[in-house]
Amino acid sequence: MKLTDPDRLFPVESATRKLARDLYESVADLPIISPHGHCDPSWFAKNERFPDPAQLFVVPDHYVFRMLVSQGVSMADLGVPSADGRAVEDDPRKIWRRFAENYHLLRGTPSSMWLDHSFEHVFDLGERLSADTADAHYDHIDAKLAEDAFRPRALFDRFGIELLATTESALDDLKWHKMINDSDWNGRVVTTYRPDNVVDPEFEGFAENVAQFGALTGEDTSTWEGYLQAHRVRRAFFKTFGATASDHGHPTARTEDMPQADAAALFAKALAGTCTPGEADAFRGQMLTEMARMSLDDGLVLQIHPGSFRNHSASVFAGFGRDKGFDIPSQTDYVHALKPLLDAVGMEPSLTVIVFTLDETSYSRELAPLAGAYPALRLGPPWWFFDSNEGIKRFREATTETCGFYNTVGFNDDTRAFCSIPARHDVARRSDCAYLANLVATGRLGLADAHEVAHDLTYRLAKQAYRL
């Protein structure tokens, strides 16, 4: 039995389906470029077996457990580690059984497709997961995980990953990346500079983080000039471990370009903990422009992930911490919010600013026209809630006519779930090929051009945008 349809996501009409299939077959086996994500670099540094099926598929994947939580299953019962010391389920088989009993809740979601792909193509399972098959699936996967062929490095190579970028905070010592670099393994795993904890005045422990930032760099981060220099030092350090990009997760897309004296005064308020919410947002916005200027000097690509109301549930945040599935999309303004940054550096062809969105209404109205005009601006692929067949389709339909394919950056999976990487890239390749097939079938794109664009969307654009 096959869990996945070989023609999944292709058009229904037979001639167009054949076009999509042919396009897909030309790119299906291209190497995976994963230039932005949240996999744990220690997996590849230590190369130890994954502990068990629950730790591989359930506990770290907020796409999975948030759906079960929405139906009344507690995070504690799914083994999600607590932040407040409460006891959580530590029996992986019990966690797996709860997951299997509720697997039907994922029907029709991208997670279901990714999981079925992983079960079939990574673990050679042909029967659907359910309460009845839970133990058999668990035993089969657990036995596979004991084999050397299922250790992280072996899977990395098997998946055809050419490059994988992880994301570390500005305070991370990057010891796992050093261990990878010092090993005899040739897999390419690089880091990404994520300075939110020393850029966001509303981040817990901001002042203490900035002090630690100074200690790490030997700079006086109690001053504005020393603080900016500390960023330059850390960015250079991250580059020695392969970083080609920085990443910034801000509540809004706001940017600022205020006089340096005003920025210094605002920084002093941030350190003192006296910023209003509006001033905190202004400081984050100023730092995006400062980071863009630094990128002109050091070449790092600037990624902006705005528009998420992070940690929407106060009780979940208190009990389980960040990144637990309660980041909710919000309406986002880009035209006015990005103008200070774009006025400052938007016409610089040597700069790459990749903007993502969780507000799909902004695609055709704001983002595509902006990216279709400013040399520095590129559109990131759909992420979080829209990393899906329908999300990718809507993205292409809303943006291509205005900014083309070449002001976008291909696909990135933005995942913590390692085994979902080939599944996610497969969905993106199928979705893009279906879109291209419709352009060919309706006379809007030549077949040879469609094959070239399919290759670009799958492989070349990501390498080009992230300077790989």
Image: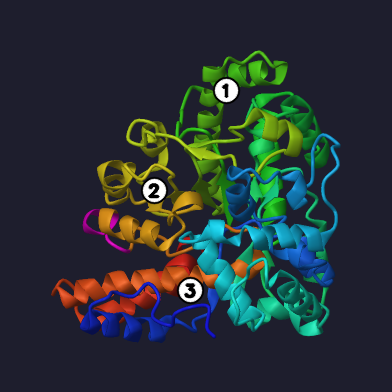
Residue 148 belongs to magenta span = no
In the picture, measured across the screen, residue 338 lies left or right of residue 126, that is left
Q: Residue 136: x and y, percent?
A: 74, 76
Q: Which residue is mark 3?
A: 426
Which SS class for mark 1? Answer: helix
Observer-side mark, 2 or 1, equals 1
Q: Residue 408: x and y, percent?
A: 37, 59
Which SS class for mark 3? Answer: helix
The foreground one among 157 and 460 is 157
Kind of residue at disc 3: Asp
Compared to residue 150, the image places residue 286 above or below, namely above
Task: Please name the predominant secondary structure of the magenta segment in the image.
Answer: helix
Residue 404 belongs to magenta span = yes
In the picture, measured across the screen, residue 154 lies left or right of residue 393, that is right
Kind of residue at disc 2: Glu
Do the CB atoms of the residues marked 3 and 1 lie less than 8 Å apart?
no
Assess disc 3: are there few (<14), some (14-19) or many (≥20) residues with their C-alpha within 10 Å of its C-alpha: many
- Is residue 80 something that shows in the picture? no
The foreground one among 35 and 63 is 63
Which quarter of the figure has residue 419? bottom right
Q: Residue 72: x and y, percent?
A: 63, 43
- Is residue 437 something that shows in the picture? yes
Q: Which residue is mark 2?
A: 348
Magenta span of residues: 399-405
Which quarter of the figure has residue 46? bottom right
Q: CA distance from mark 3 to mark 2?
A: 34 Å
Kind of residue at disc 1: Ala
Observer-side mark, 3 or 2, equals 3
